[in-house]
Image (spheres, helix red, strand yellow):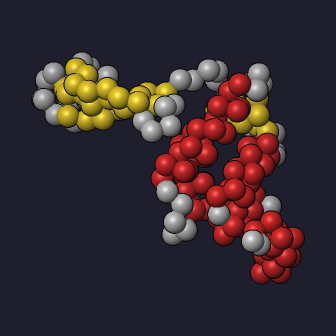
């Protein structure tokens, strides 16, 4: 593993442990050249996934991009980092085990919507505003009205 501080090619693993959800291994490393310590995360990747956008453009699946989208929707909502990580890991695992190598971006969006619906109503509506391309306040109002029953206790 290349050192992020001095770019030396070799580092030594000092500590290794699974993360809370068990889908990732956290490794503490030390550079053999400058002795700086840094953390890496290792996760299983079953297959290379390609996301097919609505305009038929293709790009590699990015877990970081998915994580960022969910995090933005959940911002200041009291949804924990572990919950977000579990949602993203679950979606990625579903995609990788689906048998498909090309996944429509709308499919990923639906999966995120389903996950956010279980986590937080405001995050669900925030994500929907981007996913469903809301143009004006009335779009929010209409959508919120249709999902109101889902979140009433």
Quadrant in which residue 146 is drawn: bottom right
| Residue at x-position 12% and y-position 29% | 34
Q: Is residue 35 above or below residue 53?
A: above
Quadrant of the image for the C terminus? bottom right
Quadrant of the image for the N terminus? top left
Residue 11 in picture, x, y percent from top left: 23, 21
**In this image, 88 relative to 4: left or right?**
right
Quadrant in which residue 38 is drawn: top left
Toward the front, the furthest residue is 153
| Residue at x-position 61% and y-position 62% | 73
| Residue at x-position 53% and y-position 45% | 85
> How many marks do you count on the picture?
0
Q: In this orientation, which residue lies closer to the viewer: 127 or 150?
A: 150
Q: In this orientation, which residue lies closer to the viewer: 25 or 57?
A: 25
Residue 5 in picture, x, y percent from top left: 22, 36
Q: In this orientation, which residue lies closer to the viewer: 23 or 29?
A: 23
Residue 61 in picture, x, y percent from top left: 64, 35
**In this image, 84 relative to 134: left or right?**
left
**In this image, 9 relative to 57: left or right?**
left
Q: Is residue 135 above or below residue 40?
A: below
Q: Is residue 70 visible?
A: yes
Q: Is residue 14 above or below residue 117?
A: above
Residue 114 in picture, x, y percent from top left: 75, 51
Toward the left, the furthest residue is 34
Q: Is residue 24 above or below residue 70?
A: above
| Residue at x-position 83% and y-position 70% | 149
Q: Is residue 65 visible?
A: no
Quadrant in which residue 142 is drawn: bottom right
């Amino acid at each position: 593993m290349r050192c992020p501080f001095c770019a030396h090619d070799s580092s030594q693993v000092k500590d290794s442990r699974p993360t809370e959800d068990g889908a990732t291994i956290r490794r503490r490393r030390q550079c053999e050249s400058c002795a700086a310590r840094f953390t890496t995360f290792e996760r299983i990747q079953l297959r290379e996934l390609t996301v097919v956008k609505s305009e038929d453009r293709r790009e590699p699946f990015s877990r970081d991009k998915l994580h960022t989208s969910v995090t933005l929707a959940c911002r200041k909502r009291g949804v924990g980092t572990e919950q977000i990580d579990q949602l993203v890991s679950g979606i990625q695992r579903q995609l990788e085990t689906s048998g498909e190598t090309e996944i429509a971006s709308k499919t990923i969006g639906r999966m995120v919507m389903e996950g956010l619906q279980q986590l937080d109503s405001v995050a669900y509506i925030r994500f929907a505003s981007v996913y469903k391309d809301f143009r004006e306040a009335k779009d929010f109002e209409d959508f919120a009205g249709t999902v109101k029953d889902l979140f009433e206790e």
